[in-house]
Image (cartoon, rainbow, N blue to C red):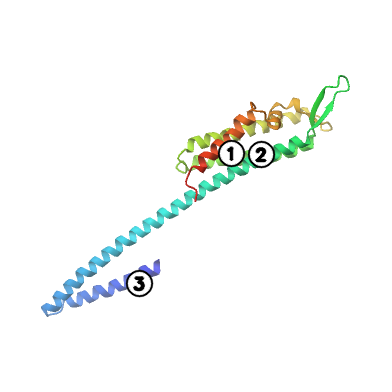
Amino acid sequence: MLKLAATFASILIVAVMAVWLLMTNPRQDVRDLGSELGKLTGQVALVTLVGGVLVQEYSRRHQQQEALNEFRKSVLRGLVRSYTDAKSCRRLLRARCRVTKSQSDGTPTVQLSRTVYEERMGSLNDTQLELEILVHDLNTFPAAFAKRNEIRGAVSKMEHYLNTLITEYEHALREVDTDHPIELALLPRLSDFIHGRKDSLFRRNFTSCFYRALSMIQAERLL
């Protein structure tokens, strides 16, 4: 672009010099020719200048649109990744639960080893932080989505739900012996997350929010 501008500037300088020489010629017919050439040079310069400005503006808008679209796609990728990571963690937790029966009355008890609990909560903590960053990004670029507030609200609910699991985890381990598994009945938030019944907080504040945010993001122009 700079090379093209430099070439045009050189041609314009030569044209101006030619016009000046013709306009200062003692012969009237030559001066008339110089006048006509000067008008033509001015018109060409004006058209080129306006065209250059329009091209620059188009390029700027195109780059801006590309950057905006890339941001939208990054939000979509982050949202989907957070959801699938949380679902994967949920399945692994459910698979590692163990059902034991009380020796006194045979009542079944669902238990989870402390090691598995700590590992999976570490993964969920990373997912919660990623959703927190998504909420921050949506606050930073308010014009990125037509329904930014609705999308942000749904993602924020997902983040808050996972945060309640992390808070429960932080308090639960203080009261549990390191050598014994943890009873799921003592962890209501984790139990809600693992079982995920239709009326569960997991369904209302995580799964439903994900699909609501997903549909709104996909409705945007993603190229």
Work out how far the residue at label 2 is from the one at label 3, CA to CA, in angstroms.
58 Å
Q: Residue furthest front?
A: 198
Place of residue 199 in the rendered image (x, y in percent of width and height, measured from the top left): 64, 26
**Local SS, label 2:** helix
Residue 23 seen: no
Q: Is residue 146 left or right of residue 7?
A: right
In the image, which is nearer the foreground, mark 2 or mark 1? 2
Work out how far the residue at label 3 is from the one at label 1, CA to CA, in angstroms.
51 Å
Q: Earlier along the polypeptide chain: callout 3 or callout 1?
A: 3
In the image, which is nearer the foreground, mark 2 or mark 3? 2
Q: Earlier along the polypeptide chain: callout 2 or callout 3?
A: 3
Snapshot quadrant of residue 82: top right
**Which numbered circle lies on residue 86?**
2
Quadrant showing the N terminus: bottom left
Q: Are marks 3 and 1 in contact (CB under 8 Å)?
A: no
Q: Amino acid at mark 2?
A: Ala
Q: Amino acid at mark 3?
A: Thr
Place of residue 138 in the rendered image (x, y in percent of width and height, measured from the top left): 51, 41
Q: Is residue 14 left or right of residue 66?
A: left
Report which residue position mark 3 lands on.
7
Place of residue 56 in the rendered image (x, y in percent of width and height, measured from the top left): 37, 59
Q: Residues within 10 Å of mark 3 (few under 14, many from 20)?
A: few
38 vs 221: above or below: below
Report which residue position mark 1 lands on.
132
Q: Are marks 2 and 1 in contact (CB under 8 Å)?
A: no
